[in-house]
Amino acid sequence: MILLCKYLVNLSEYLLFLKLNQIIMKIALISTFLITLLIQTTSNQMNSRESVSGVHYLDGKPVTLEFNDGNISEIIRTKELVKNSSWFLAPGLIDVQINGYMGVDFSGPNLTVEAVKKATKALWRVGVTSYFPTIITSDFSLMKKNFAILAKAMEDKEIGNSIPGFHLEGPYISPIDGYRGAHLEKYTREPSWKEFLELQNAAKNNIILITVAPELDGAIPFIKKIVDSGVMVSLGHHNGSASQIKDAVNAGARMATHLGNGCANMINRHNNPIWPQLSEDLITPSLIADGFHLNREEIRTFYKTKGADNTILVSDALDLAGLPPGEYIRGERKLLLTPNVVKFPGINALAGAASPISKCVEVVMDFTNCSLEDAIKMTSSNPAKMFSLNDRGLIKKGRRGDIVMFTMSDNKINIKKTFVAGKEVYSLD
Ligand SMILES: [Zn+2]
């Protein structure tokens, strides 16, 4: 009996011990869970919550922008600014026509994903948060190869956010001197839907803009097909008549590529491709406002006719942009890079632009006396709207945190910081 009692006491002690152990285990598990949750929440907040203060580009008044998960989560207007009172905050610049940058040529034979990353990072330094790498008229297999490389670069986690799609400028453009611009005649040709599909396949459907000459054989049905496939058609490097331009607009073309350039020097004063595109309400022209491709009077006239709401500025920069001035060999040609522009040596003709789109903000304000608001409209909000990039182009709650921070003095822009998807990707310090 005594033995039995002893046994029962031991058993109850053992059971109590087991119960206590279970309780301790449960407490330990719950504590671990809570601590992990706390650490995760804190680190998430540290990772995704960033903010930047300056003055709003629309009114010059203090503002703090908070980012969360890549987007603008709060726009806080304060009466007094504690710091950065001279730094403007504006939507990041969007360049829909850029051939290369800092020695990286998007149409060249040496393009790699690494090179695209290099160009993208260099563009962040000049306030560009999105751009359309532009492939011009060249050897067809090279175009295909380069579109495939650009499509790969778009998938890159670090830079992919800055490339919403590509611009194909040519090869279906005028072969005639002057209208053809710097494109090589031997690669120009008549539009081919089959060929375009090959390029679009290589680009994984990321060609979102194509520049076409409307007077070429088959151009109008080609434009219709392209537009139906969801790609923007811009008229450029052409000598289309008023009726051909009208037909192209009826087929869905909505832009004119670098209006006033890609045009012969000697044109008829009544019948030329500039007036019909300027007078057509449905056409939004892009302008190279680098101060060299169009003169003050041209920029003023185009701006007054179309207005800030219907104008898009582009750099059309060559890969030489960003490099030191001097002579360079590109493909089959020798080029001269001056501090402002690229020329063909000897004939003193323009070969291309050498300034990033931030220069266009300076020039358009200088030439037209437009406001900073309008200049940013033409270099960010309008291209975003035109290409339905509805997550960028404005400082608005819920839009992506693509922001450029800069000062302006003597009409010169000085970029201080650039943010892409709420992340600081460049700082002057
Ligand atoms: Zn061009």
Image: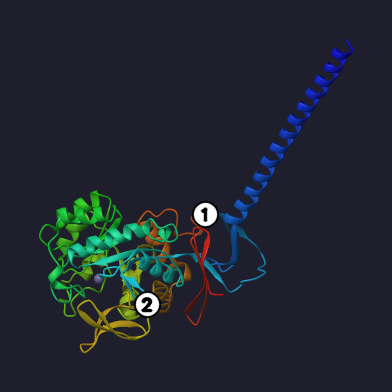
User: Label 2's element?
Assistant: loop
Q: Residue furthest bottom?
A: 346
Residue assigned mark 1: 71
Q: Nearer the viewer, residue 89 or 260?
A: 89
Image point (22%, 69%), residue name: 275
Which residue lies most toward the right here? 2
What's under tag 1, amino acid-wise?
Answer: Asn
Mark 2 and mark 1: Cα distance apart in space: 29 Å
> Total number of numbered labels?
2
**Where is residue 329 shown, x and y percent of the image?**
25, 81
In the displayed image of the protein, which residue is found farthest to the front? 3
| In the image: residue 263, left or right of residue 402 | left
Q: Can you tell which mark lies on residue 355?
A: 2
Q: Quadrant of the N terminus?
A: top right
Residue 57 seen in this snapshot? no
Measured as percent of width and height from the top left, residue 66 is found at 59, 57
For mark 2, does the 10 Å Cα neighbourhood hold few (<14), some (14 to 19), or many (20 or more) residues?
A: many
Local crowd size for mark 1, using a 10 Å CA cut-off: few (<14), some (14–19), many (≥20): many
